[in-house]
Structure formats: C-alpha cells, structure tokens
Image (spheres, rainbow, N blue to C red):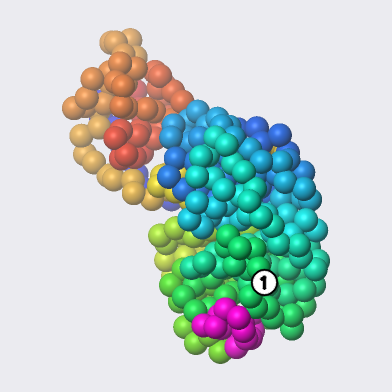
C-alpha cells in the first residue's frame, strides 16, 4: 500500500489534521531561564537570553533538542533585549541602561562596562563598533562598544520601543507614532529622514532587503517598504490573534512573537499579501524570536527559551513512500530501514510529537535535514 504525499498547506486546519494550537510548527525543546525571557540572540552554538530580573542567560544549543544553561550574568534592572557584537553581548536593561558583557568565554560572562541611560532602554541593535538603543521617551542613543560612551543621539522621537539597523539607516518602532527611519551615516548625528504611521502600537522591527517588518501590537505584522527611506510606506499587513511584541525574518518568512498568541509564521514572499502559514501556541507569553538554521528560538516569558521548528516549507513530494500493514511488521518507508531502527530518521505527528510506530494518519519525516510529509494509510 502506498502513502499519498501532499505539500503542507493551511487548508490542513479545515481537514482537522492540525490542532488549534499548532500548524506546521513543532516543539523541539525548552530551557528554563530563571526569569521571564524577553529577548534572544543566537550565535554559533549559543543562545543569549535577556531574562528580565535575572539578567543574561547563556544557553548551549549545539544540540537543539537538549538546550542547557552554561553561564549567566545577573544584570541590574530588567533585561529586555540583547544583541551581539564581537566578543560582547549588549543587554538593554531598562532603567539600568546598557550593560556590556564579555562573552568570549560563554560559560563565564563578565560585565566590563555600562552606559547609564537617561530613561529606560528597551531594545538594542548593533552595527560596526556601535550599539543603537531604543531609549523610550529619550529617543535613539548611539553607544560605543566596548567603551560605553554616548557618541550621538536623536531625541525627536516619541517613545522608542524597538530598533533595527540596516546599512546606513536605523529603523525605530516608536509606539503610537509608528515607524521612524533615521540616517546613521554619521553615528554622531543620527537624523530622522522618514516616518510611516501604523494602526497599532509599534513594539519592534526587523529589516530584510527593502522592507521593514513591524510588530505592531494589536495591529499584527506591518510590512513597510523602505526602498525610499525618506518616504516609507505600508504595502501589506497580516492580522494576528493576540499582541505582537517581537519579530524576526528569515528567507521569505517573518516570525512574529504574538504574546499570548504564541509564535506566528507569516509568509512575506509577496510583501503586499503577507499570510500566516504556521503557528505554535507557546506556553508563556512570546516576547521575542530569532531564527538560526532550521530552528526558531522564542523568548517565551515565564516559559523561558523555547526551541521550535517550522516544517511548512522545503517539503518535497515523492512517489515512493510506502507503508506496510502494522500486523506485517514495523512500519517502514520505502528505501530505508525501519523507522524505529534508523538513527537519522525521525517521525513527528501534526502536533510535533515524536512517533516510533505510526498508525494511519498524517506525519512528518525528517531525515538528514530533509523534511517530507506523508499520509499513512492501511
């Protein structure tokens, strides 16, 4: 008996294949961060998590299915965001300013300096030798790293919440006033060049190519063209069920941290028509996310760091997937040894749960980085 193979499509919801809390995204693992996880950055084999009152937590992710904390630095204030520059982690620590922490030895992070802000630093992005911080009511500040000296600022913004840097421009998510574009060609003198209003409350922003993707609070995801930085304009929008706190991009997808709505995966292959292609209802409130390789790392509030995987793209149709009757021996896929005896082959159900001997139903088979979707029939 041959199995029927399909591409992964949102219509699976209507067919009852995926539950209401999961579509095309599977849970991989989680790691307690001992505090509410608000922001995350990944480099090499480590995730660096801004964990509210518990500062910076360093999580080993060489094996994403078994993340483990290897080091930490307990910063003052509330750690909201983190960005990596060279051997340093820059932590946005609210009223405690910007903390600059050496992570040259990830197991033993050490603070080497800090910038004492005027107000509350909520987000940080890095470029060159500078950290660009969203300083709430005090606008955008430019801080040297590792020197922790303020080299420039722009305080004409209203309530700077999030920041992303691309080339010679900084994009600032500015709450009720939407998205601001600043020229940072001279870091000592950042200048506003454009602004685009958004219907929600702009909390965070990510930039990819000629577009800025805004986590717009109750407004979901806003897609804004910045091809002309002096005249940014919204070209698309995708609603989300809860409240968008954070956003990351990878390839043709945006990954929206939607607060109590968990992680939403939104295709932006057509920026004018963004559409949700996956989601996962994280435990805890999703505040931020980043993508590295095949995995999504979500700062999920009290649930700590959650590791997820989106399998809605890259699924290949084949014509030779075969399933034997359960009463004739172990379930196998043609061209391979038994699922439960294969070290590289892993089978998941539509909820992301690992399966050893599949019964009739829909499954996802991952083997050496390749993911296929199969429907097992008797």
Image quadrant where one finds the C terminus: top left
Coordinates of residue 341 in the picture (x, y in percent): 30, 16
Residue 358 seen from this side: yes
Give me the residue at 40% from left, 22% from top: 358
Left or right? Give the position of 333 relative to 169. Answer: left
Residue at disc 1, secondary structure? strand
Residue drawn at point x = 48 percent, y = 36 percent: 61
The x, y position of residue 77, in whole percent, is 79, 50
| Magenta stretch holds residue 192 | yes
Q: Give the residue at x 18% y 27%.
A: 335
Residue 78: x and y in percent read: 77, 50
Residue nearest the viewer, comparing 340 with 18: 340
- In the visual, does 156 lie left or right of 321? right
Residue situated in front as seen by the camera: 362 or 306: 306
Question: In the rendered image, which quarter is residue 212 located in?
Answer: bottom right
* x and y, in percent, of residue 35 in the image: 73, 38
- Residue on which the image places disc 1: 150
Extent of the magenta region = 178-196
- With respect to residue 270, does 192 lie above or below? below
Q: Confirm whether residue 259 shows in the render.
A: no
Query: On the rendered image, what quadrant is the N terminus found in?
Result: top left
Give the left or right position of residue 167, taking residue 378 as reference.
right
Seen from the viewer's position, the closer of residues 334 and 220 is 220
For the point 29% across and 20% down, the residue is 342
């Amino acid at each position: 008996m041959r199995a029927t193979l399909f591409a992964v499509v949102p219509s699976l919801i209507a067919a009852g294949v995926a539950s209401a809390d999961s579509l095309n995204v599977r849970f991989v693992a989680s790691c307690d961060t001992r505090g509410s996880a608000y922001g995350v950055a990944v480099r090499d084999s480590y995730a660096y998590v801004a964990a509210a009152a518990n500062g910076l937590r360093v999580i080993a992710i060489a094996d994403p299915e078994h993340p483990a904390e290897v080091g930490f630095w307990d910063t003052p204030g509330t750690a909201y965001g983190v960005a990596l520059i060279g051997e340093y982690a820059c932590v946005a620590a609210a009223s405690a300013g910007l903390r600059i922490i050496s992570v040259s030895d990830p197991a033993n992070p050490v603070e080497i300096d800090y910038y004492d802000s005027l107000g509350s630093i909520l987000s940080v992005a890095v470029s060159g030798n500078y950290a660009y911080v969203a300083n709430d009511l005090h606008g955008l500040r430019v801080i040297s790293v590792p020197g922790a000296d303020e080299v420039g600022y722009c305080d004409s913004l209203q309530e700077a919440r999030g920041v992303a840097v691309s080339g010679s421009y900084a994009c600032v998510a500015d709450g009720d006033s939407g998205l601001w574009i600043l020229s940072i060609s001279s870091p000592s003198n950042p200048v506003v060049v454009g602004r685009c209003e958004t219907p929600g409350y702009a909390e965070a922003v990510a930039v990819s190519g000629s577009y800025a993707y805004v986590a717009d609070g109750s407004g979901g995801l806003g897609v804004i063209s910045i091809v002309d930085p002096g005249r940014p304009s919204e070209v698309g929008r995708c609603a989300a069920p809860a409240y968008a706190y954070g956003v990351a991009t990878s390839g043709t997808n945006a990954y929206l941290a939607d607060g109590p709505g968990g992680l939403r995966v939104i295709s932006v292959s057509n920026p004018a028509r963004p559409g949700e292609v996956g989601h996962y209802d994280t435990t805890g409130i999703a505040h931020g996310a980043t993508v590295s390789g095949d995995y999504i790392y979500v700062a999920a509030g009290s649930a700590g760091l959650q590791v997820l995987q989106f399998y809605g793209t890259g699924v290949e149709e084949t014509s030779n997937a075969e399933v034997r009757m359960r009463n004739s021996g172990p379930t196998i896929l043609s061209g391979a040894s038994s699922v439960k005896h294969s070290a590289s082959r892993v089978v998941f159900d539509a909820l992301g749960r690992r399966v050893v001997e599949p019964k009739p139903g829909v499954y996802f088979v991952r083997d050496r980085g390749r993911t296929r979707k199969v429907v097992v029939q008797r």
